[in-house]
Image: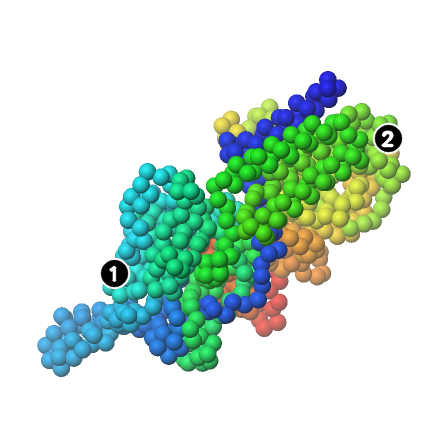
């Protein structure tokens, strides 16, 4: 027992840490990130696929905007759309994933009213015709009359900002104040809202909010079916449509054994009830059917012009929404990074009607804690007593049981149980026990430490020491990735500090950047004043050398933000760095004179990396990579910056800015990238006016992005000095 006491204590400490997270005494962000990822994997594994023909999405798509006009359309057009759907196509119900918050002034009625009071006040014919015009040109009233008596559910939104504005009208609440009495409730409380015009809301059959819950990582996994505002309760769009399909059936909260927090909603009467599982926030997990377009889509323009087969819509539930990127209703989901928001509601409606919603009740918290205690205690007690082989088999068995139980509950009971924490606990306890006792370096490792330790991270030295014959410092040619970083305006900074302060600043800066480089298996080549040169792929082969270099650059920029406050607190200037990365064939090895040598890289690809660092200043971006680097990193999102021909280069080079790992880039930034790519295509086709318009829109969207202003200035120059029909969009630099 005493022999293993330290390992028992360390295992117990790890178990306590994990149990505290599971019981929500504290939260470990990485666990939440991994749990979200594993949930998304299970969702993708279990999607039924195929199309659900019961729900059809009438899409305000690019085709509709081109044929009918830009959104918002006149209410007379929307009224005609509703009339066609309900009267001509005989649909069962229509739901709007848009809000009609502002009066429609597109008819010109307001202008006519002003003329009647001023210039045409004495024109009797005009004055006689005006009452009839008021009726025919009041599009809001026309739309309101169209809604009357038709199965139409309007959409609206809530806002959680404390002083959020309140506009439009809300529908009658689904529950009054005091619905829960003395029961505990955690239902989301919203402060503001954006509703529809009062006359529209009064004539609509129902209305529901279209607010999904966006998780910590920007992914939409849940929809709050019931929310609270000013003490009363309102329903989601999907729930409102399901209730209307069931004749306006009531909805009731459900409690386990009559006590505790809410666990389900019942829709309908005693003879016919739809039971909807919800969490303690009255939110339901979205039952994604598959990727985008798991439901039939038809263009709104085709509906308006009668180009749709009536059989395709008759008796269907209709959702009117948009997939057009410019209308900004694309969301990040477990099944797609840019998923139409309207299809989330379609999935919810289908899941409610089919009873396929998975449940994550409040008692899952206790189940996770019990699982952690049982598995963690068993591994903590047994692993120190076993040989490496048997310890590996035990850990593998525990992981198998944990995952199998989780999947059984997922598929068999429709229950979502957290998975990340127990997996990480098993792996951590295994790693802790397997690494115990390995503290003495071998002779071979010490030799490699002396040879390579000043260049490469210690973990790579360990890897090399296991097979020293494979490594040498002799020059060889291979594909590597090189990184150059440089401090902006360093001369000015150095002149503002005394030598002691400058030395301290550089030591802290270079130390932080070196730590990031080593974190991603990089080899520090040299420091050149304030500049850093590093490379990946040697001396230890790294198949992910390009990816690790890009991750290093992104982490360097994050680390610069972490250094900002400590530097400013000491009266030091805030540092900004530019980073250039390039991948290609390079010569690597021990080079120099008999007096002094260095393990370094040389070649044209290295020079290109240095030039890319210089170009970061030209484009106002923190990081630039070459096209070979971009091609080698498949799971990263990049912003194309330009095609350039630096001095001394014959062929043009495409340059890119890394934005982030795919799946982690926020939806609004992804939409911005799509708009930028469109602007770039317009620029290269010499469509200066449209390109400039798009760039101004991007400037308003991201005012701190210098790149857009640079291209606006470039367009102004090219207008005065057109490049000619043979122009390929390549920027030529004569000094870089």
Q: Quadrant of residue 534?
A: top right
**Which element carries disc 1, helix, strand or loop?**
helix
* Residue 142 appears in the rendering: yes
Q: Residues within 10 Å of mark 2 (few under 14, many from 20)?
A: some
Farthest top residue in view: 2
Looking at the image, which residue is at 62% across and 26% down?
A: 13
Q: Is residue 323 above or below residue 31?
A: below
x, y percent for residue 75: 31, 70
736 left or right of 696 in image: right
Q: Residue at x 68, y 29 (%)?
A: 380
Q: Residue furthest right?
A: 469
Q: Position of residue 371 (x, y in %)?
A: 60, 36
Please tell me which residue is depicted at 39% across the width and 42% down the height of the picture.
258
| 227 on left or right of 30 | left
The first of marks 1 and 2 along the sequence is 1
Left/right placement of residue 141 relative to residue 554 reads left
Which residue is at a point 14% across and 71% down the rendered structure image?
118
Residue 161, how many percent across, how many down? 36, 45
Which of 410 and 721 lies nearest the eye of the viewer?
Answer: 410
Helix, strand or loop for disc 2:
helix
Q: Position of residue 321 (x, y in %)?
A: 43, 65
Where is mark 1, residue-wise?
Answer: 198
Which callout, 1 or 2, points to the residue nearer the camera?
Answer: 1
Q: Quadrant of the N terminus?
A: top right
Q: Please determine whether, in this image, residue 267 is positioned above or below residue 382.
A: below
């Amino acid at each position: 027992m005493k022999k293993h006491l330290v390992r028992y204590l360390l295992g117990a400490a790890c178990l306590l840490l994990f149990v505290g997270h599971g019981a929500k005494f504290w939260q470990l962000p990485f666990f939440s990130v991994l749990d979200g990822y594993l949930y998304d994997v299970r969702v993708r594994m279990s999607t039924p696929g195929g199309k659900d023909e019961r729900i059809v999405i009438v899409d305000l798509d690019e085709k509709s905007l081109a044929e009918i006009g830009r959104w918002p359309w006149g209410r007379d057009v929307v009224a005609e759309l509703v009339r066609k759907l309900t009267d001509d196509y005989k649909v069962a119900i229509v739901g709007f994933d848009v809000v009609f918050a502002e009066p429609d002034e597109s008819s010109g009625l307001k202008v006519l009213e002003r003329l009647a009071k001023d210039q045409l006040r004495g024109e009797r014919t005009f004055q006689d015709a005006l009452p009839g015009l008021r009726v025919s040109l009041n599009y809001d009233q026309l739309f309101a009359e169209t809604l009357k008596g038709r199965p139409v559910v309007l959409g609206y939104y809530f806002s959680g900002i404390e002083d959020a504005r309140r506009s439009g009208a809300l529908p009658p609440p689904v529950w009054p104040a005091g619905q829960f009495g003395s029961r505990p409730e955690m239902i989301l409380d919203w402060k503001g809202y954006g509703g529809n015009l009062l006359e529209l809301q009064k004539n609509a059959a129902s209305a529901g909010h279209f607010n999904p819950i966006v998780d910590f990582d920007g992914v939409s996994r849940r929809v709050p079916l019931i929310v609270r505002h000013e003490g009363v309760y309102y329903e989601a769009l999907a729930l409102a449509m399901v209730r209307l399909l069931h004749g306006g059936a009531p909805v009731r909260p459900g409690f386990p054994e009559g006590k505790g927090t809410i666990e389900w909603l019942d829709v309908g009467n005693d003879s016919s009830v739809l039971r909807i599982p919800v969490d303690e926030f009255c939110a339901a997990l979205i039952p994604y059917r598959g990727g985008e377009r798991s439901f039939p889509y038809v263009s709104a323009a085709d509906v308006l012009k009668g180009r749709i087969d009536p059989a395709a819509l008759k008796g269907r539930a209709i959702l009117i929404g948009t997939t057009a990127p410019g209308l900004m209703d694309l969301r990040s989901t477990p099944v797609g990074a840019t998923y139409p928001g309207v299809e989330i509601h379609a999935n919810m409606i289908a899941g409610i009607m089919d009873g396929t919603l998975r449940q994550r009740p409040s008692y899952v918290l206790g189940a996770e804690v019990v699982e952690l205690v049982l598995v963690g205690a068993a591994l903590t007690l047994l692993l120190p007593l076993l040989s490496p082989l048997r310890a590996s088999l035990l850990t593998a068995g525990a992981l198998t049981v944990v995952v199998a139980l989780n999947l059984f509950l997922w598929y068999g009971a429709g229950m979502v149980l957290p998975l990340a924490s127990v997996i990480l606990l098993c792996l951590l306890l295994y790693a802790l026990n397997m690494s115990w006792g390995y503290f003495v370096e071998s002779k071979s490792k010490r030799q490699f430490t002396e040879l390579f330790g000043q260049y490469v991270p210690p973990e790579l030295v360990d890897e090399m020491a296991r097979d020293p014959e494979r490594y040498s410092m002799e020059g060889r040619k291979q594909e590597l990735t090189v990184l150059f970083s440089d401090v902006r305006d360093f001369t000015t900074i150095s002149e503002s500090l005394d030598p002691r302060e400058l030395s301290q600043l550089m030591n802290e800066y270079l130390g932080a950047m070196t730590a990031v480089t080593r974190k991603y298996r990089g080899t520090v080549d040299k420091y050149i004043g304030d500049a850093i040169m590093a490379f990946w792929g040697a001396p230890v082969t790294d198949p992910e050398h390009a990816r690790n270099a890009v991750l290093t650059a992104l982490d360097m920029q994050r680390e610069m933000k972490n250094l900002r406050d400590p530097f400013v607190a000491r009266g030091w200037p805030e540092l900004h760095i530019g980073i250039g990365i390039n991948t290609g064939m390079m010569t690597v090895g021990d080079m120099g004179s008999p007096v002094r040598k260095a393990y370094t890289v040389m070649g044209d690809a290295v020079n290109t990396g240095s030039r890319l660092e210089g170009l970061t200043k030209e484009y106002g971006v923190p990081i630039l990579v070459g096209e070979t680097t971009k091609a080698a990193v498949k799971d990263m999102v990049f912003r194309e910056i330009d095609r350039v021909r630096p001095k001394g280069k014959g062929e043009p080079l495409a340059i890119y800015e890394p934005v982030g790992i795919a799946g982690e880039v926020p939806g609004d930034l992804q939409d911005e990238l799509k708009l930028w790519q469109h602007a770039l295509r317009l620029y290269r086709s010499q469509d200066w006016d449209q390109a400039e318009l798009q760039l101004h829109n991007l400037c308003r969207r991201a005012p701190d992005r210098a790149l857009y202003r640079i291209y606006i200035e470039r367009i102004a120059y090219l207008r005065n000095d057109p490049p000619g029909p043979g122009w390929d969009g390549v920027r030529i630099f004569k000094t870089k």
